[in-house]
Amino acid sequence: MNTDRSSSPGHASAGESVVPPFAVVPGGQVQQALEGREKEIVEVVEAAYRLHGAGRTVNPPSSFLRFPDRPTSRMIALPASLGGESPVDGMKWISSSPGNVASGIPRASAVLILNDPATGYPFACMESSIISATRTAASAASAADRLSRDRPRPTRVGFFGTGLISRYIHTFLEGSGWSFDDVGVYDLSADSAAGFRVYVEQSGSAAAVTVHPDPEELIRTSDLVVFATVAGEPHVTDPAWFDHNPVVLHVSLRDLAPEVLLASTNIVDDIEHCLRASTSPHLTEQLTGNREFVHGTLDDVMAGTVTVPGDRPAVFSPFGLGVLDLAVGSYVYDRIARTGELRRVDGFFHELSRYG
């Protein structure tokens, strides 16, 4: 990761403990720091995966806050610590309210807190729905590349679910060097599908856009399939839909029945994290009583210790690691700090003398 946070104002040199200044980073600054840098951000995310695979992170299980009176809504806390040359601690706090979609606003909202490892003090609060979508999209773009290296490179991509995450994944695929002959679209909402079609057509993509009437047609006509839905339980159950051996980015984690996973090569971001919370891999473990259907992690694939054959579907199921949010958030913070445009909140920490 190419960062210089250790030399930023407020970060202590060796042997010192200095409370860092606190900054608030709004979404406009976040987007400006990330826009058009898809290839670089994929490299940032892959570097974080390598640190995680090498044991240089701390990434405890996410904590879910659910509501008896709002069963479709949830809030999730993702604490994490990222090592490496510019270590950082912190937490993403992300809310999912599917009912927002009917009001025309995004389902998810989030903030990211970055903490200074030397003192434990927070030094930034960042708008993080953009960071979260970016790290998800960069992870998906990396997986699409890594999982397709031993098969013909996909030229037909299909998006099952057409919200903000699908838009970001499409942007990252195109921005990291992919080109497609056809972009397939399927969504339970005809308006959402139509809106995504307009987005693709206006994005500058040369691909034809096809809105499919049913999910089977979308899957069978796509050799790269992106699942980005709000499904709470599996709804795609027939392994025969995947007989053409596509690469599947199972980003929403709960779309595929165990029968589909058992007929596929399965790659995850982290085995312990992914096989919990009633994800499709978790349900498959419960059905089979073992984890033998999981072939490895994306870091294993990057390291060459796991190969992904081209003669069966390849499914990437990422639970979403907090260390990726820290990596992308740190990248954003460092870019803004170098411009001198951080919006610091003077006096945010008031009691700084231990003895008054």
Image: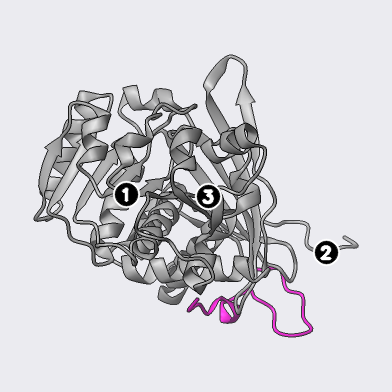
Estimate how packed mark 2 is, as few (under 14), some (14 to 19) or many (20 or more) residues with alpha carbons within 10 Å: few
1 and 2 marks in contact (CB < 8 Å): no
The magenta stretch spans residue 3:
yes
* Residue 105 point in image, percent of width and height: 34, 32
**Residues at circles 1 and 3 in contact by the CB criterion of under 8 Å:** no
Q: Residue 245 carries which label?
A: 1
In which quadrant of the rendered image does the C terminus lie?
bottom right
Identity, as a three-letter code, of the amino acid under mark 3: Gly
Residue at image position (35%, 59%) is 310
Question: Which residue is nearer to you in this view: 273 or 261?
Answer: 261
- Label 3: which residue? 320
Which element type, helix, strand or loop, lies under badge 2? Answer: loop
- Image coordinates of residue 242 in percent, x first then y, are 32, 41
Query: Element at badge 3?
Result: loop
Residue 16 is drawn in which quadrant?
Answer: bottom right
Left or right of 310, for residue 68: right
Q: Name the residue under label 2.
A: 353
Q: Where is residue 249 in the image (x, y as percent from the top left)?
A: 38, 48
| Highlighted magenta segment, given as a residue range | 1-20
- Amino acid type of the residue that numbered disc 2 sits on in the rendered structure: Ser
User: Which is in the foreground here, disc 1 or disc 2?
Assistant: 1
The front one of 54 and 245 is 245
Say whether residue 52 is visible. Answer: yes
